[in-house]
Image: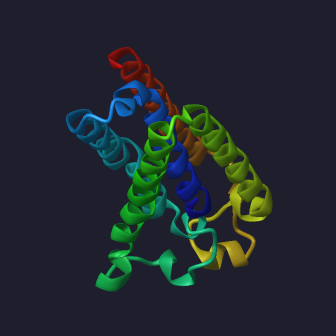
Amino acid sequence: MLAIDVPSSVFLGLVLAEGGRKMLAGGEPQKIRYMRSVVLLFTIFLYTPVPLIFLNGWPAWQTNYVMRWAGNLVDDPLRAAVTVLFYALTVLPAYGGFEFGRMLIKKGKAKMVRVSYIVMVFVTAFIIYLTREATFKVAPTYEKFDAGEFFPITHGGFFICLLITSIVTWGSLFFVYRRLRKKS
């Protein structure tokens, strides 16, 4: 859901900054560029496709039942362009989280990077709590949600998609984090 995609993106940027903290601590431009590339490529290819999958399959749920028009993105270029917005709402926060983490590392406060991403976990959990009605009741369109035609988040194909994308995304993050730690 969009409400948790943004803080999750910040979390991702912070985690990757911590993974490459030794490379970042040296302040070498080549290593900083490398780390920026890792963050951007990871976000673009391994994180952002997940919200787009859910936007295409369950647009009302993905937009937290806030943007009624998102339930029908076809045949309207302006609505279809919301895909670009999703890229911006995942890539920019990840990059911002990374740069914030890099700044903390540069100032000798590397432990604060971990504190920051733990805070992002709590922020995300709090958002899930606040949006629990929308989070745990899935409907592809607003009309179906309003009509009470929704299903629980643990339902069939939706849950399998959620499970697979979660395993791939967070498993990849763990793998890249470990590689960065070794490379550092």
Residue for point 40% across, 52% down: 95
Res 24 quadrant in image: top left
Q: Position of residue 170 (x, y in %)?
A: 51, 33
Residue for point 70% across, 58% down: 135
Residue in the foreground of this view, choosing between 77 and 40: 40
Horizontal side of residue 138 vs 130, given as left or right: left
Residue for point 45% across, 63% down: 89
Residue in the foreground of this view, choosing between 134 and 93: 93
Q: Name the quadrant of the N terminus.
A: bottom right
Residue for point 70% across, 53% down: 123
Q: Name the quadrant of the C terminus.
A: top left
Q: Is residue 56 above or below residue 175?
A: below
Q: Position of residue 25 (x, y in %)?
A: 40, 31
Q: Is residue 4 above or below residue 19?
A: below
Residue 35 visible from this viewpoint: yes
Residue in the foreground of this view, choosing between 111 and 47: 111
Q: Position of residue 110 (x, y in %)?
A: 54, 33
